[in-house]
């Protein structure tokens, strides 16, 4: 950050606590949940309860009678809750408190609260217990936390006891005072903010005797407002990915007490590792102070005093070739350098060299004043008991300075050899050139170091390098095994286990490709992975094409099967009968679909049913043709019985006789279609009716003609008109009677003949 931004106050956070819950549980009677205790013989205070549900926990939190709450089960916080009592302790019994993005707010000034032996999950931006009332004190003991923040206590004191671990996504702790108690361990990790944010002016950070504070952060490890006091009596291990290790604003101070250890690694690409703006940094006798940074600004910066006291062990390294080890901001800073084992320095850009640029052995004292934090800083008032240092030392060009146990030659050589194993000062990765021989050589140098503390620290780095090499070798072996497994799986997808065949096996299916894909995905070498992926992609293409072809073939088979089946009754060839709607067009359409099938076995099955349908249709068509011929013959015969060959004339021809009707009847009887037969039979019946009527009329006419002929003939002698003489008995009455019979005759010709003879008889009678 820009130096002018360092004095900005911490972000103000508006605190909102919503009280949710049953008001009926606001007051809990004395020991109300005691009967449900699962603690057994555990001794608990008489003003305590054991809870196993959120309702019970909420009631206990709100109860004025309860100070100590014992968990008997994992519990999920159901509502953000305000706590008004001044004492409230939660004993977790190794259960889980799921904060559920809700919190428990301490609202009364001076409240003392604690949580122990519990796992806390899913906290929001306030943590679990929190509050902004004055002088709150909250202790966490043996707590494992995950969530947005472990604690927000802007006007209170957060105390860590036992072992407390936090994995936060924002500033892990944000508040005024933080204490790591003697012998306690705090592992504070933040993936999105500061591990520790001392936001309130005049706050403090205290690391107790034999206590350990391990902070891992994406941003700044420890950030403090103005007038902050940091006191380390234990072990501080700080590492930031992209930020500084410690930044304390105006008027703050850092105190590294005897026996304390600081290892601070800054990841900021341009700024300092440690900063006490307008403040002081004191490293006392017996303290170990090791700072590494990689920015263009100095590694350790103060604005009042930097004191590296006699008996302290210090190593300050800036890995940036444009950055110095020491600097000042925003005021001139007095620097006191003291070492009973001398001091060594490295010019910027040479800090990885095993041999220092300059060594100032023996009991060493120096003092000078710095202004500025870049390489253009000024150095004044230099005094020293070492003449060489007095004449040669310049802070600006110095990228590394060590003293105390770090300054001994054997230690320096060993440390440089150890450092050379790693890619950078974070010591999270070894160089590609680091092999077992390099580690063994560095280990030999470490074994020569006499200072047990320094030796232990270096051995720790050796062990780390060995672990990384072992992991690298194991990873290489594992990678080789992964590559071999992936190669085998990919090859076995293809004919002859060779992708060059460009043809997959018949047994290669999606499951086989997916299994090979999983093995390829496990490969980490990008080049090898790309090669395998290329062959895998080809196998997938071939399978997709095969599946597409199979799907197309299946669709063709299904379409053909449907078309063939639908030719038959009930869509089933087993009926051995085709539908009435099945015609040649339907069979031809089905045939086209069958011809599109490529599977020979399936095609043969379909063709068999298709051929049967054709046979049945041919038989049906032949029968229909025969029937049509019968119908046509019968229709012609019936029609020809009628005038104009049309039954609608309702008159039969003169030539129509019983033989003609009987012949037509025989043809009608041969017709099998009942409807057509009925139509023909109807017309045939009408012809018969008309013939019968005609025959009956002819018989009547014959009788009339015979009677008239007899009567007319009997008028003449010998009953013969040819005599041209009437009988003596023929009178007018006889003629009139004959005339009446002649008039009844309907045949005009016959009637005319009879009338002629009748008229002659009348003439002969008249003449007589």
Image (tube, grey):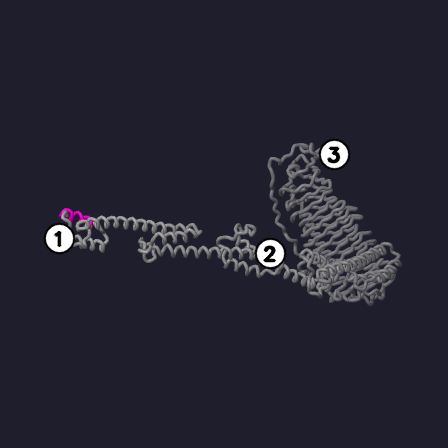
From the image, state whether disc 3 or disc 1 is nearer to you.
Answer: 1
Earlier sequence position, callout 2 versus callout 1:
2
Say above or below: 357 vs 468.
below
> Dot 3: within a 10 Å radius of its alpha carbon, few (fewer than 14), some, or many (20 or more) residues?
few
Gap between marks 3 and 1 measured at Cα: 164 Å
Residue at x 55% of width, y 60% of height: 591
- State yes or no: residue 604 in magenta: no
Say above or below: 37 vs 300.
above
Using the image, tell me which numbered label, if any, was put on residue 764.
1
Element marked by disc 3: loop
Earlier sequence position, callout 3 versus callout 1:
3
Q: Nearer the viewer, residue 736 or 428?
A: 736
Using the image, tell me which numbered label, if any, was put on residue 40.
3
Using the image, tell me which numbered label, if any, was put on residue 605.
2
Name the spot of residue 16 as percent of width and height, x first.
61, 46
Gap between marks 2 and 3 measured at Cα: 79 Å
Element marked by disc 2: helix
> Dot 2: within a 10 Å radius of its alpha carbon, few (fewer than 14), some, or many (20 or more) residues?
few
How would you classify the magenta stretch by its main secondary structure?
Answer: helix
């Amino acid at each position: 950050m820009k130096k002018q931004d360092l004095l900005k106050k911490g972000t103000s956070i508006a605190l909102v606590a919503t009280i949710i819950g049953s008001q009926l549980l606001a007051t809990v009677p004395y020991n109300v949940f005691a009967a449900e205790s699962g603690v057994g013989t555990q001794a608990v205070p008489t003003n305590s309860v054991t809870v196993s549900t959120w309702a019970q926990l909420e009631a206990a939190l709100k109860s004025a009678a309860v100070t100590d709450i014992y968990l008997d089960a994992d519990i999920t916080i159901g509502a953000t809750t305000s706590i008004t009592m001044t004492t409230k302790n939660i004993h977790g019994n190794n259960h889980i408190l799921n904060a559920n993005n809700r919190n428990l707010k301490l609202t009364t000034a001076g409240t003392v609260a604690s949580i122990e032996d519990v796992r806390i999950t899913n906290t929001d931006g306030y943590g679990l217990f929190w509050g902004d009332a004055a002088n709150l004190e909250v202790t966490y003991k043996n707590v494992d936390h995950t969530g947005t923040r472990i604690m927000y206590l802007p006007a209170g004191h957060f105390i860590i006891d036992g072992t407390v671990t936090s994995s936060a996504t924002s500033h892990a702790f944000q508040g005024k005072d933080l204490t790591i108690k003697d012998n306690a361990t705090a592992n504070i990790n933040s993936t999105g903010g500061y591990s520790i944010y001392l936001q309130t002016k005049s706050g403090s950070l205290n690391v107790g005797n034999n206590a350990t504070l391990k902070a891992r952060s994406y941003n700044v490890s420890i950030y403090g407002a103005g007038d902050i006091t940091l006191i380390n009596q234990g072990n501080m291990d700080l590492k930031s990915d992209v930020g500084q290790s410690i930044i304390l604003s105006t008027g703050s101070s850092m105190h590294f007490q005897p026996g304390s250890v600081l290892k601070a690694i800054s990841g900021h690409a341009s700024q300092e590792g440690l900063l006490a703006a307008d403040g002081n940094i004191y490293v006392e006798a017996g303290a170990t102070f090791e700072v590494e940074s990689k920015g263009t600004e100095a590694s350790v910066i103060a604005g009042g005093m930097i004191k590296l006291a006699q008996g302290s062990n210090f190593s300050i390294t800036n890995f940036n070739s444009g950055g110095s080890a020491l600097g000042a901001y925003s005021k001139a800073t007095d620097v006191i350098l003291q070492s009973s084992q001398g001091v060594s320095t490295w010019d910027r850009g040479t800090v990885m060299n095993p041999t220092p640029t300059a060594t100032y052995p023996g009991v060493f004292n120096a003092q000078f004043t710095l202004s500025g934090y870049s390489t253009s800083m000024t150095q004044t008032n230099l005094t020293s008991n070492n003449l060489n240092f007095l004449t040669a030392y310049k802070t600006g060009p110095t990228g590394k300075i060590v003293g105390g146990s770090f300054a001994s030659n054997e230690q320096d050589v060993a440390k440089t050899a150890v450092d050379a194993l790693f890619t950078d000062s974070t010591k999270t990765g070894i160089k590609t050139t680091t092999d077992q021989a390099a580690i063994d050589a560095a280990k030999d140098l470490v074994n020569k170091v006499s200072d047990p503390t320094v030796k232990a620290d270096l051995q720790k780095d050796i062990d780390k390098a060995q672990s990384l090499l072992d992991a690298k070798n194991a990873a290489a072996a594992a990678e080789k095994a992964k590559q071999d497994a992936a190669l085998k799986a990919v090859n076995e997808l293809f004919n002859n286990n060779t992708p060059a065949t460009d043809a997959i096996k018949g047994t290669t299916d999606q499951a086989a490709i997916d299994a090979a894909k999983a093995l390829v995905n496990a490969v980490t070498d990008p080049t090898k992975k790309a090669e395998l992926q290329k062959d895998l992609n080809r196998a997938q293409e071939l399978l997709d094409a095969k599946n597409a072809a199979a799907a197309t073939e299946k669709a063709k088979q299904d379409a053909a099967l449907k078309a063939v089946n639908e030719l038959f009754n009930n869509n089933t060839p087993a009926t051995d009968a085709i539908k009435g709607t099945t015609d040649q067009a339907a069979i031809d359409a089905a045939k086209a679909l069958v011809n599109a099938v490529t599977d020979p076995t399936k095609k043969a099955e379909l063709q068999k049913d298709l051929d049967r349908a054709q046979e049945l249709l041919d038989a049906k068509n032949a029968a229909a043709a025969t029937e049509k011929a019968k119908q046509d013959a019968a229709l012609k015969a019936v029609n020809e019985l009628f005038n104009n060959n049309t039954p609608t004339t309702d008159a039969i021809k003169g030539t129509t006789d019983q033989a003609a009707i009987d012949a037509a009847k025989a043809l009608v009887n041969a017709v099998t279609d009942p409807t057509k037969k009925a139509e023909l039979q109807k017309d045939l019946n009408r012809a018969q009716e008309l013939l019968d009527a005609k025959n009956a009329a002819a018989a009547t006419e014959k009788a009339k003609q015979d009677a008239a002929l007899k009567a007319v003939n009997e008028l003449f002698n010998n009953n013969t008109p040819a005599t041209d003489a009437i009988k003596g008995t023929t009178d007018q009455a006889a003629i009139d009677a004959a005339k009446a019979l002649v008039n009844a005759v309907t045949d005009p010709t016959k009637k005319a003949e009879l009338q002629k003879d009748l008229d002659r008889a009348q003439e002969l009678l008249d003449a007589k």
